[in-house]
Structures are given as C-alpha cells and as structure tokens.
C-alpha cells in the first residue's frame, strides 16, 4: 500500500537521538510511504512515489501528518482495582511516601491484585491496552510487580504475554518482583531481596525458557528508593539478573538520590527511569553510556509535585532521553502518550519535535527495540499514525483530546477514530 499526500511525513530515520541531536524528525514535506507485508519498503516525495509505484493500492492521507506509532517504554499495565482514596488523601495533604509507610501505596494494589486469576488480570488490563492504542501507542512495555510472590508475579507475566497475543497493542514484558517489600517481609527486606536473588530470578529464567522458548528474556527491573530497595539490594538483584542474561531496567531517583542511575549505567542497563533527583555525576555517567534516560512526566504531575527530570542537563550531557507514561494506579493513571508529550514540552522544556523523538525512536531504544520500531525506515515494522492535523506542532499544543485519526499496526489499519 502506498500512503500518499502526507503534508508532513515524520520518518525519525537515523537511529536513537543523543543529546543535541534530539528532535530530528526526518520530515518529508508532501511525503508518501510504501508498505508491503507489514513492513516499510520506501518513502519519498508523494509525486515521485506515485510515479514509481503506479500499480500499488493507494491510501490518501488527506494532507495530514503521518508519523511512527508512539512507543510507551514504562507502564504498570497489569493491576486490579484503583487507589482513588489515596488520591484524595494526597489532595488533603498526605504525601505518597507517608501513605506508603502507613501500609498504602504499592502493597495496597498488591493486596487487590495478587489473588486475581489470569482471566481477571487480562480483563482488567485489556480496556487500558485498547485505550492506549486508540491514543496512538502501538508498542508498550508492561511490568509485573503487584504480586510479590513468585506464583503471582509469573501469573502477571502470563497476563502480559496473553494480552500481547490477543490485543493489537504490542507488549514488551518486564519482571518487577522487586517493586516493593511485601508485607510478609516488612521486617526483613534483606530476606526478600535474597529470595529474589537466590530463588525467584533463577526460577524465572527456567520458567521463561520452558514457557516461551522463542521469546527474548524479559527485562528485570528494581524500585531503588527509600522505603523500597536500597542501592545495595538493587545492586544484588540487578547483578544476579545480569548474570542470568536478563536485560535490565531500574526505577531510580523518583524521590531521593540513592545512586541507582549510576548503578544502572555501570551494569549496562537498557534504561534508567524516573530520574527526578538525579545528581550531576549521575547525569554525566548517563551521557557517556547507552543507558536510555526515561522521564515519566505524568508521575510528578500526578503527585502534584513541581520538580521534574532535569532533561536539559541530560541533553547537554549527551544522554539519550525518552519519555513514558508510567501508567499505574498510584501515581499516574495515564494511558495517553499524547498527554505525556504535552506535559513533557512544558515541564521538561523540550520542543514538540524533541518530545516526539523521545516518544518514538528513543522510547524504542529504552525497550531494546530501536531496530524494529520507533521510526519509519525500510525494513522496519509498519506501525504508524495518521493525525487529524497538518502540522506536528499541534501535538502537545492541543492537549486533553486525541489527535490520532488512524492507527496502522504491522501494515494493517487497526484504529479509525471518528
Ligand atoms: O513508577 N515507583 C514505583 N512504581 C510506580 C508507582 C506504583 C504505584 O504507586 O502503584 C511508579 O511511580
Ligand atoms: Fe514505574
């Protein structure tokens, strides 16, 4: 199929964008793109492409923007229930950490989630996955982390794999048994850490190879934070995961600077996420590494905080900046990467072009998929959006609605928003 008459075709060609290179949209005015067998074949000016491929079935983009599908590289998609009550407590003046210390927070969702069946987990997450797709997210990372026992964590992984099969939204799984200290271990966090290291991770590796031998291993992630896992405990977990061959992620510097970002860099993690309280030394380390810095703008926003990721410093240090929703029931119930773009432009002080690159090719790099998705280049998956506007700058500028008119996943139209 030849998609022609795109006022702006954003290719994002050329790979992940470091430092000051962030924001190169690879924009082709009056562009066209050729898709065959779910894969991008070629692109160029509409006039030339129509001439070169006269027999190809055609789709008229109507003079609008055509761009890669959005990639959401950090979500907690799998959970039951909600924490609207905690939101209200925060509005009345309690902090997230106070609520967590009083037995609320992540373990509250764990209580609602850990006994759910596979069917219940999938049924709760499916509408969220479908909502994300309608808002233009064509691939998302999805974490476990609301079970905190091996059987419940593996069930959440199964839910991710099942949703990936059943839904159009493509999912990239992450194992996050180290999301919180489960209540059984409240007085023995080191005991839980050792359980994760000595038993749960090796068992996960065997389970994965038995269950889905042809899929690459999932990411292993840790919440490195006061009240969750210390730097040393995070190190123990990530070192073991690395030994077992898992690619790594970390939640670091959300509330305190513990050194998690530099740890991630030292271990060659694929990404380090949150990065609000990140130190200059950590940022310098990021800048000379391939670890992607993932800013989760909806999280401080969702918490009503005013401090965000020091994105300008990360860019100045030559880091690779990506943005994500952090979709979760505690801090940021956000299914729209368009809204993430709107927040990121304002609070990270980045341009719309930079936010688009951070939400496509760099987001793909943050989940180890930059060779398959995140840009429209020959050989890559045909995951793309047709917007309802003719200038990409409308993304982020107009917010709260949906500027996505059509979504294509692997060469097929899967969403048509009226
Ligand atoms: O990324 N920080 C840890 N995890 C989530 C919050 C999860 C929750 O509160 O349920 C986050 O913000
Ligand atoms: Fe998170």
Image (cartoon, rainbow, N blue to C red):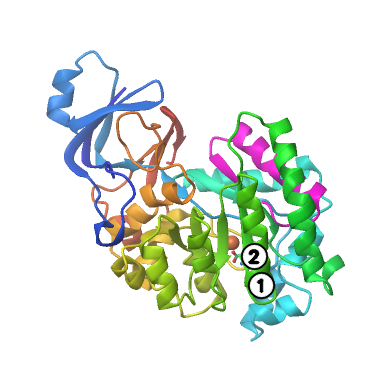
Is 160 colored magenta in this rendering?
yes
Q: Considering depth in this image, is 223 or 201 the residue closer to the camera?
A: 201
Q: Which residue is mark 2?
A: 234
Quadrant of the rendering where the C terminus is positioned: top left
Measured in 3D between alpha carbons, the distance from the residue under mark 2 to the one under mark 1, in whole angstroms, is 6 Å
| Mark 2 close to ligand 1, CB under 8 Å | no
Q: Considering depth in this image, is 230 or 143 the residue closer to the camera?
A: 230
Quadrant of the rendering where the N terminus is positioned: top left
The answer to which quarter of the image holds residue 225 is bottom right
- Residue at the bottom extreme of this rendering: 93
Measured from the top left, where is residue 325 in percent x and y? 51, 59
**Quick check: 333 left or right of 28?**
right
State which image quarter holds ligand 2: bottom right
Measured from the top left, where is residue 232 in percent x and y? 65, 70
- Disc ID at residue 211: none
**Quick check: 220 left or right of 158?**
left
Residue beneath the point at 57% across and 77% down: 255
The answer to which quarter of the image holds residue 356 is bottom left
Residue count near mark 2 (Cα–Cα under 10 Å), binned few <14, some 14–19, many ≥20: many
Residue beneath the point at 33% across and 44% down: 387
Q: Which residue is mark 1?
A: 230
Tell me if label 2 and label 1 are in contact, CB under 8 Å. Answer: yes
| Mark 1 close to ligand 1, CB under 8 Å | no
Please state the extent of the stretch shown in magenta in the rendering. Answer: 144-173
**Quick check: 330 left or right of 30?**
right
Numbered-mark total: 2
Residue count near mark 1 (Cα–Cα under 10 Å), binned few <14, some 14–19, many ≥20: many
Measured from the top left, where is residue 78 in percent x and y? 67, 51
Residue beneath the point at 44% across and 57% down: 291
Measured from the top left, where is residue 4 in percent x and y? 23, 30
Q: Secondary structure at mark 1?
A: loop
Q: Secondary structure at mark 2?
A: helix
């Amino acid at each position: 199929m030849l998609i022609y008459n795109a006022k702006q075709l954003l290719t994002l060609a050329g790979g992940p964008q470091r430092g000051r290179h962030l924001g190169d949209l690879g924009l082709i005015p009056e562009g066209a793109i050729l898709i065959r067998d779910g894969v991008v074949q070629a692109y160029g000016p509409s006039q030339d492409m129509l001439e070169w491929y006269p027999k190809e079935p055609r789709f008229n983009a109507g003079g609008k923007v055509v761009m890669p599908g959005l990639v959401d590289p950090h979500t907690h998609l799998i959970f039951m229930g909600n924490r609207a009550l905690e939101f209200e407590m925060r509005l009345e003046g309690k902090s997230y950490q106070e609520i967590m210390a009083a037995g609320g927070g992540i373990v509250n969702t764990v209580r609602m989630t850990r006994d759910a069946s596979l069917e219940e987990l999938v049924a709760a997450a499916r509408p969220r996955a479908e909502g994300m797709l309608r808002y233009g997210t064509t691939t998302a990372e999805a974490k476990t982390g609301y079970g905190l026992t091996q059987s419940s964590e593996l069930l959440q992984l199964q839910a991710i794999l099942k949703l990936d099969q059943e839904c159009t939204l493509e999912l990239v799984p992450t194992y996050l048994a180290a999301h919180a200290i489960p209540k059984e271990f409240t007085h023995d966090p080191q005991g839980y850490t050792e359980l994760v290291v000595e038993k749960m991770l090796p068992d996960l590796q065997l389970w994965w190879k038995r269950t889905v031998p042809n899929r690459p291993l999932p990411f292993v992630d840790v919440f490195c934070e006061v009240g969750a896992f210390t730097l040393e405990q995070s190190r123990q977990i990530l070192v073991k995961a690395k030994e077992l061959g898992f690619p790594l992620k970390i939640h670091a510097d959300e509330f305190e600077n513990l050194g998690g970002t530099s740890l991630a860099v030292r271990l060659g993690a694929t990404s380090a996420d949150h990065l609000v309280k990140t130190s200059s030394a950590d940022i310098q380390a990021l800048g000379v590494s391939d670890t992607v810095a993932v800013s989760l703008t909806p999280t401080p926003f969702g918490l009503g905080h005013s401090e965000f990721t020091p994105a300008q410093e990360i860019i100045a240090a030559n880091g690779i900046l990506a943005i994500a929703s952090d979709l979760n029931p505690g801090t940021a119930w956000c299914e729209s990467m368009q809204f993430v773009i709107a927040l990121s432009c304002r609070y990270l002080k980045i341009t719309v072009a930079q936010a688009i690159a951070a939400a496509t090719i760099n987001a793909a790099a943050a989940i180890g998929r930059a060779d398959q998705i995140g840009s429209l280049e020959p050989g890559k998956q045909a995951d793309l959006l047709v917007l309802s506007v003719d200038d990409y700058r409308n993304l982020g500028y107009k917010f709260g609605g949906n500027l996505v008119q059509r979504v294509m996943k692997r060469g097929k139209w899967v969403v048509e928003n009226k």
